[in-house]
Amino acid sequence: MIPAYRRPLCINRLSMNETAPPSDRVAKPERGDETRDADVRIVALLCVGLLILIGGVLLLLGGIYDYFIARQTRSGGPFSVPAVTRQLPPEPRLLVNPTRNLQEMRAREDEVLHSYGWVDRQAGIVRIPIDRAIDLLVERGLPARTTGDRESSWPGLFQHGRIMNYPPCCAR
């Protein structure tokens, strides 16, 4: 006999005990094709039962619908209260006509982009049309930075033309 502490947790009696009586042995199923087909009568009865169930549910729902329609016509009221009375949302109604508001906003933006005007009169800053700004940019070119400007803007960042440390805004 094996002591309890050395005994496996799960023992298959038939694999370990080949001398078991034939009534305890389970026959292994043979591999291969099925020997029986599904019973056609049972499958047909299930399909007919399912169709009867679906038909019953449809009839029940149709009866409930007719009941509610008859009840509504007897009461004489409208079918839907919100369809009859339209209530405005509470104040402030910010976008009463969104299409018109969008058109007005784009017209104001186009006015700013295509006209001259003051941005800050005391500082002498003016606004010029975008087409004129593009022409001036092509004519004069972009201002170039010298290496002294680059190094003074971020000390310790550039060394021998290479980025050594990240600036505080881009630190990882």
Image (cartoon, grey):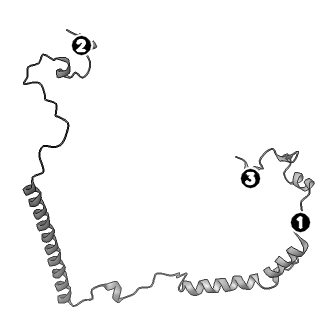
Residue shown at the point (16%, 85%) measured from the top left: 70
Residue 84 is situated, as x and y percent measured from the top left of the image, at 34, 89
Earlier in the chain: of badge 3 and badge 1, it is 1
Mark seen at residue 4: 2
Mark seen at residue 143: 1
Direction top: furthest residue: 1
Residue shown at the point (13%, 66%) measured from the top left: 53
**Label 3 sits on what residue type?**
Cys
Mark 3 element type: helix
Between the C-alphas of marks 3 and 1, the distance is 24 Å
Mark 2: give few (<14), some (14-19) or many (20+) Cα within 10 Å.
few
**Residue 19 figure quarter:** top left
Observer-nearest of 40 and 14: 40
**Label 1 sits on what residue type?**
Pro
Direction from residue 56 to residue 94 in the image, left or right: right
Residue shown at the point (16%, 17%) measured from the top left: 17
**Label 2 sits on what residue type?**
Ala
Mark seen at residue 169: 3
Direction bottom: furthest residue: 76
Q: Quadrant of the N terminus?
A: top left
Direction from residue 23 to residue 105 in the image, left or right: right
Question: From the viewer's perspective, is residue 55 above or below residue 116?
Answer: above
Mark 1: give few (<14), some (14-19) or many (20+) Cα within 10 Å.
few
Earlier in the chain: of badge 1 and badge 2, it is 2
Question: From the viewer's perspective, is residue 24 above or below residue 151?
Answer: above
Observer-nearest of 28 and 83: 28
